[in-house]
Image (tube, grey):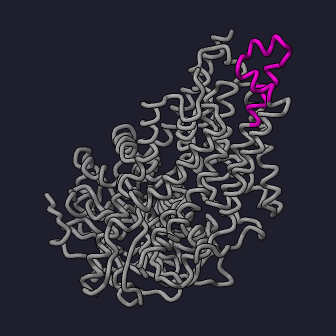
Amino acid sequence: MKKVSSIFLMLSFLVFSFGASSVMAAEAPVKLGFVYIMSGPFATYGQFAKHGAELAIDEINKGGGINGKKIEAFFEDSAGKPDVGIRVIRKLVYENGVDAVIGLDSSGVASAVAPIMKELKTPLIITHAATPDVTGKNCNRYTFRISLNENQNMKMAAAIAADMKARIWTTIGPDYSFGHQSWEYFEKYLREKKPDMGFVPVSDVAFAPMKTTDFSAYITKVMSSKADGVLVSLWGGNLIDFVRQASDMGFFDGKREVLLTLGAATEVLYTLKDKMPEGLWVGTRYWFDGNDSPENKSFVQAYKAKYDVYPSYNAHGAYAAVKAFAAAASKAKSTDKEKIVDSLSGLSLTLPVGKVTIRPEDHQAITDGMWGKTASDPVMPIRILKPVRNFVGADITPAVSETGCKME
Amino acid sequence: MEGFLINVLNGLSWGMLLFMISMGLTTVFGVMGVLNFAHGSLFMLGAYMSMQLVRWVSSFWVGLIFAPLFVALLAIALERFLLRPVYGRDVSFQLLLTFGIMLFLDDGVRLVWGPAHHVVNPPDILAGVFPIFGQTYPVYRLFLIAIGPALGLGLWAFFSYSRWGKIIRAAAMDREMAEIVGVRAPILFTSVFGFGAWLAALGGALAAPHQSVGPAIGEHIIIESFIVVVIGGMGSFPGAFVGALILGLLASFGATMAPDFQMALPYILLAIILLTRPRGIFGEES
């Protein structure tokens, strides 16, 4: 009896799944794979990105899809680890048969994954990871980035630092390539602007492992150095812990200038709320209140209506990548991977953040950037940016010759 | 000099958090012989529970008192219905089981509270800063530094002088003999496991205002706690205390003085101890 019922169960399951797939197979969908950090201390970034992607997919599907085909999404967790990132991307391409991969938060994952895309012959649109290498010395035909990279962000940071009172700079950052490279580029660009600026030697700056939850030792190290300017490149859960502990220890007492390179992430601002000090310069890839264009207004409105929070730069990155893929597909009138790659290269489109052009020589997006100063606003649940400083994309993007990219 | 003293305070406050987690781990191991992989998840659950209670009744103290109790009750149920059936079996069953509980709790926490981080404020009386060594230092960290040794001393006195403490030690030493003279070992084990969980969750509730409450909050601290327990000697309280102090100070001075291999320092120490004195600094000869 037991056997019969289990056979019945299995049959009904088979019938059901066949039935379901035959409905979906009516029109083969466009498949997009998304890889973000969905677990661990940086998991909010993945959640925002997923929401951004789903919003874009909804909009496109409601408008008739891509070349008449609906988009189907597959989400995978990179856990912020390079080996996991490679594994889930292979799974997306070989098992799910995705037409493109979108995502990546960590520079460590991005550096490991980019070379694999050549082998998988599948387009990858990076939306958050900022290492210059993937559109620089390790650039390749299949790898694109729709968001600002580290050089661009550090050019802005250096421009702001040049106007500050601080004469000697140091840094607190995560102890992996992102933190180290941020400091390296910041020093380089600030020296170009102000040759007499002082920098603390690299042995005396503070790089904290990503799993750190107690930053007191690093805060003490920086506070007892002679630096009066601090570049903070921590992000995610690290940045939240740092800001709280640093406030307690009197770090933000006005004796030093502080730049938070990724401080305007709404993921962080929603957690900290009024615990985020006012008057700090913070960087971002996108700010929901950054411009009044109709694209931005409708994006922010739709996102706020659906998820009840303001979109973060990571939400915008995922949204932007889906829109860019759709634009490339409709330009190519195909979702063939090689044609998408050709069509993404040099693509220009208007996104909520503004006009974005993917430079064909290195596949890096040229887009305007901004930094802002944290301020409070009684009607807003989180800190706002006031005033802001806008930068023109062309001014903050290093020339192709400087990137080290040789596109094959 | 000021930098040096502040580093000592930084090291002590982190060390005392480590000590609280390690105490639970070492008690459960010392008495029951169970290496509890889920200890870090119980720490995390303590932090989330206290955060939730603070949100509901907006009192840090309510969270501090009740969150560890809830977690202890849960742990008692886990011991009674999951761990107890595998005591007789190979030790790998226990390891797998506690590992499974860890995965279950970690994902459960994410299902209930989502991936976001949460901020818990210290109570007003502990929220300020204290002028010390020419700069200011958070009162809450000084509170952590004070509460660690107090709790440690209390536990030490409990195990050394109280009747219950003596019974627990007796059962740990020779379970069969203790049962023959009338100790009800199963109940004893259940309460020890619950107590270990209470300590872990207390550590979590105390850590909540010190850092933010988010997924993976327990990951880093539990690995260091395992190192503390091995360095200090499995099952030893003074060992956990000294081990936690060493690791706390290594973390703060390592970050300042040896930034390039600061991450490796605890592991180097662990290797040295395992090579030269495998039973740990305070471990007893088996």
Q: Position of residue A164 (x, y in %)?
A: 41, 89
The C terminus of chain A lies in quadrant: bottom left
Using the rendered view, name the quadrant where residue A246 is placed: bottom right
- Residue A74 in sight: no
In the drawing, does residue A273 fall left or right of residue B77? left
Q: Is residue A43 magenta?
A: no
Report the predominant secondary structure element of the magenta stretch: helix
In the drawing, does residue B67 fall left or right of residue B28? right
> What span is colored magenta in the figure?
B166-195
Q: Is residue B185 magenta?
A: yes
Residue occupying the point 65% across, 79% down: A380
Q: Where is residue B57 in the image (x, y as percent from the top left)?
A: 83, 61
Considering only vertical position in the picture, is A348 above or below B251? below
In the drawing, does residue A87 fall left or right of residue B229? left
Considering only vertical position in the picture, is B43 above or below A313? above
The N terminus of chain A lies in quadrant: top right
Residue occupying the point 49% across, 72% down: A263
- Residue A25 in sight: yes
Residue B105 or residue B64, whichever sits in front: B64
Residue B31 or residue A185, whichever sits in front: B31
Considering only vertical position in the picture, is B210 above or below A170? above
Using the rendered view, name the quadrant where residue B143 is placed: bottom right
Residue A56 or residue A269, whichever sits in front: A269
Q: Where is residue A196 in the image (x, y as percent from the top left)?
A: 27, 87
